[in-house]
Every structure is written in C-alpha cells, then in structure tokens.
C-alpha cells in the first residue's frame, strides 16, 4: 500500500507552454453561440416564472396582498391580483420576454464579435498561453 503513495524521484518532464494570439472571432460562430446561450436563458426564464408563480399562487400570497391593498385603498378599489397574475398572463409575459431576449442576445453577439475584430486589428489581438499541466 505504501508504494501507491510514493512518487518517483526522477526528473520531471518540462512543462510545455504554447503562446497563441486570438486575432478575430468569426461572426457567424458568435451568432450561433449567442443564440444557444440565449435559448438556454429563455428556457430558464419561462421555467423560473412558472415556478415562482406556482409558489406564490399555492401559498396564497396573491389573495393576501390583494386584500391588504383593498383595505389600504378602500372598498371602492377594484383590485384582484389573482386574475391579474393568472398563469396565462404570467406565462405570456415570460414567453414574450424570453423571445425578446433571444433576438437581442443573438444580435448583440454579432455586434460584440464585430467590435472585437475591429479592436483586434488595432491592438493585435489577445495573447494566450497554454500549458500541458
């Protein structure tokens, strides 16, 4: 068992380092990655909105806050949070925001790739060093 933990005292192999420069990002590649990231965020937004609504609806928060607002604003106020924050309204809003996020994030990925390419032409790119550790 002791042999498993003993290390050889021989010379270690030298660490090999490779220096590379990132000079440009292909815009189409950035668009594809941006789309996939925004799609994942859109799914998370819709699922998160559903889970938050589910917790709030089952715990009775909408009814409690609605009755509190009704007592503060008076009996003449027509506040019904349960109908305002129905599942259909929440899911519609979350879906619209998710689709808007997909479009904007995909477009911004292309814009940022173009900006990086312009700056890279001026300053020469980003230097990276890789090792084989």
Image (spheres, rainbow, N blue to C red):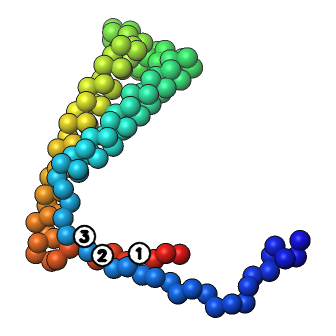
**Residue 22: which disc?**
3
Mark 1 lies on residue:
130
Q: Is mark 3 in CB contact (under 8 Å) with mark 2?
A: yes
Tell me if 18 is positioned left or right of 60 in this view: left
Res. 114 image quadrant: bottom left
Q: CA distance from mark 3 to mark 2?
A: 7 Å
Could you say whether the residue bearing mark 1 is in a helix, strand or loop? strand
- Marked residue nearer the N-terminal end (3 or 1): 3
Closer to the camera, 93 or 34?
34
Question: Image quarter for residue 43?
Answer: top left
Task: State which quarter of the image contains the N terminus.
Answer: bottom right
Q: Residue 38, labelled with which disc?
A: none
Q: Are marks 2 and 1 in contact (CB under 8 Å)?
A: yes
In the displayed structure, does residue 115 sit left or right of residue 1?
Answer: left
State which tag comes first along the sequence, 2 or 1: 2
Please rate how many residues cluster around mark 2, counting C-alpha atoms within 10 Å: few if below 14, some from 14 to 19, many from 20.
few
Measured as percent of width and height from the top left, residue 71 is found at 44, 16
Figure check: 105 above or below 83:
below
In the rendered image of this protein, does residue 11 appear above or below residue 88? below
Disc 2 target residue = 20
């Amino acid at each position: 068992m002791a042999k498993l933990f003993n290390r050889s005292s021989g010379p270690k192999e030298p660490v090999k380092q490779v220096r590379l420069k990132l000079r440009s990002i292909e815009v189409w590649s950035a668009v594809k990655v941006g789309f996939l990231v925004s799609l994942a965020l859109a799914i998370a937004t819709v699922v998160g909105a559903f889970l938050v609504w589910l917790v709030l609806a089952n715990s009775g928060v909408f009814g409690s806050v609605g009755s509190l607002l009704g007592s503060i604003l008076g009996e003449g106020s027509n506040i019904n949070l349960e109908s305002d924050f129905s599942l259909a309204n929440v899911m519609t809003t979350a879906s619209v925001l998710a689709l808007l996020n997909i479009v904007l994030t995909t477009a911004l990925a292309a814009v940022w790739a173009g900006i990086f390419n312009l700056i890279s032409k001026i300053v020469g790119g980003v230097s990276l060093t890789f090792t084989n550790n």
